[in-house]
Amino acid sequence: MGRQYKQSCSRCHAGPGKPCVLAEGTDASKVRPFPHDERVQPILDERKARQQTNPTVVPRPWRYEVTCPHCAQGPESRCKSPGGPHRARVERAKEYTRLQKARSQ
């Protein structure tokens, strides 16, 4: 079971290890498909606090910046597309990284 079931639910009083029920006092066969917000919120708050104290940087899938073949943005510039780097740039950077690793070995 998920981490949210390690604590009891303050709303439906489901015990640790038990899923939340649809309404307080109903039998255990009428379980909710997901836990109550009150049961999940402390876990989300803990995660948010952990991320703020120790932010993680998501590494790019490549090591070297390359010029974008689609929009011609240079190595130190972002692509002009609102959705992030163009796919062609990502593929070129991955290939460049792969070739660099092969040469250095």
Image (cartoon, rainbow, N blue to C red):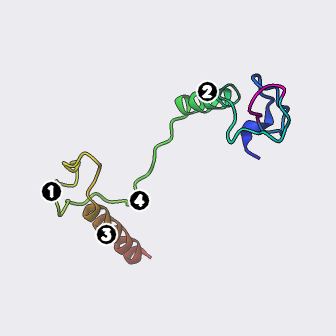
Distance in Å between CA atoms under marks 3 and 1: 18 Å
Mark 4 element type: loop
Circle 2 Cα neighbour tier, 10 Å, few/some/many (<14 / 14–19 / ≥20): few
Discs 4/2, front: 2
- Residue 101 is left or right of residue 14, and the answer is left
Residue on which the image places disc 3: 96
For the point 56% across and 30% down, which residue is it?
48
Distance in Å between CA atoms under marks 1 and 4: 20 Å
Discs 1/4, front: 1
Mark 1 element type: loop
Give the residues drawn in magenta, as a range: 20-25
For badge 2, the amino acid type reads Asp
Q: Earlier in the sequence, mark 4 or mark 2?
A: 2
For the point 68% across and 42% down, which residue is it?
33
Q: Earlier in the sequence, mark 4 or mark 3?
A: 4
Q: Earlier in the sequence, mark 3 or mark 2?
A: 2
Circle 1 Cα neighbour tier, 10 Å, few/some/many (<14 / 14–19 / ≥20): some
Provide residue 49's location: percent of width, then percent of height.
58, 27
Discs 4/3, front: 4
Mark 2 element type: helix
The disc label shown at residue 61, or none: 4
For badge 4, the amino acid type reads Pro
Residue on which the image places disc 1: 71
The secondary structure making up most of the magenta span is: loop
Front one among 92 and 97: 92
Q: Earlier in the sequence, mark 1 or mark 4?
A: 4
For badge 3, the amino acid type reads Tyr
The disc label shown at residue 45, or none: 2
Provide residue 16's location: percent of width, then percent of height.
84, 34
Q: Earlier in the sequence, mark 3 or mark 1?
A: 1
